[in-house]
Image (cartoon, helix red, strand yellow):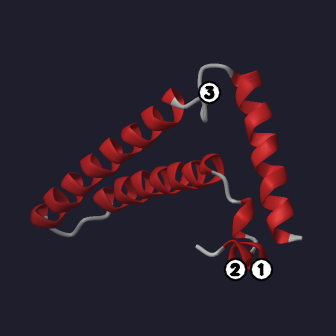
């Protein structure tokens, strides 16, 4: 994207870390939504389709998590480090909005 346009829209503040975390949060939401939908199915056929979608959503979540962990963007097993990253991402998001 054009650097001038990026500054005008605030997109210059989006980092790989912020984008990846947003992607991970959406993946988590998808897993939850599919899991709830499976419990509300009207037919076995629909349940089977949703179960397949749920498995794919779980696989996607795992891939995103691994990507982030390999690049030091996510520390699920080191809470103090993750808190620091979260605070940095929050500040970046607030800077975009202001």
- The residue most toward the top is 78
How busy is the neighbourhood of tag 2: few (under 14 within 10 Å), some, or many (20 plus)? Answer: few
Q: Secondary structure at mark 3?
A: loop
Q: Secondary structure at mark 2?
A: helix
On screen, residue 27 above or below 44 = above
Image coordinates for residue 28, horizontal then vertical, percent: 48, 50
Residues marked 1 and 2 touching at CB (< 8 Å): yes
Q: Say which of 22 and 16 sits in front.
A: 16
Q: CA distance from mark 1 to mark 2?
A: 5 Å
For label 3, the residue is 75
- Identified at 43% across, 32% down, the residue is 66
Q: Say which of 14 and 51 sits in front.
A: 14
Q: Say which of 25 and 14 sits in front.
A: 14
Q: Nearer the viewer, mark 2 or mark 3?
A: 2
Mark number displayed over residue 29: none
For label 2, the residue is 5
On screen, residue 8 above or below 97 = below
Task: Point out the image quarter for the C terminus.
Answer: bottom right
Q: Secondary structure at mark 1?
A: helix
Image coordinates for residue 3, horizontal then vertical, percent: 69, 71
Q: CA distance from mark 2 to mark 3?
A: 33 Å
Q: Quadrant of residue 88?
A: top right
On screen, residue 72 above or below 4 = above
- Identified at 69% across, 79% down, the residue is 5
Mark number displayed over residue 8: 1
Identify the mark nearer the N-term, 1 or 3: 1
- Identified at 35% across, 58% down, the residue is 34
Q: Quadrant of residue 67?
A: top left
How busy is the neighbourhood of tag 3: few (under 14 within 10 Å), some, or many (20 plus)? Answer: some
Task: Point out the image quarter for the N terminus.
Answer: bottom right
Identify the mark nearer the N-term, 2 or 3: 2
């Amino acid at each position: 994207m054009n650097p001038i346009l990026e500054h005008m829209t605030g997109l210059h503040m989006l980092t790989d870390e912020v984008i990846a975390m947003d992607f991970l949060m959406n993946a988590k939401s998808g897993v939850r939504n599919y899991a709830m939908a499976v419990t509300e199915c009207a037919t076995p056929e629909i349940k089977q389709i949703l179960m397949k979608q749920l498995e794919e959503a779980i696989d996607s979540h795992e891939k995103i998590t691994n990507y982030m962990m390999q690049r030091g963007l996510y520390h699920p097993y080191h809470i103090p480090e993750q808190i620091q990253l979260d605070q940095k991402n929050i500040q970046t998001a607030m800077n975009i909005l202001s």
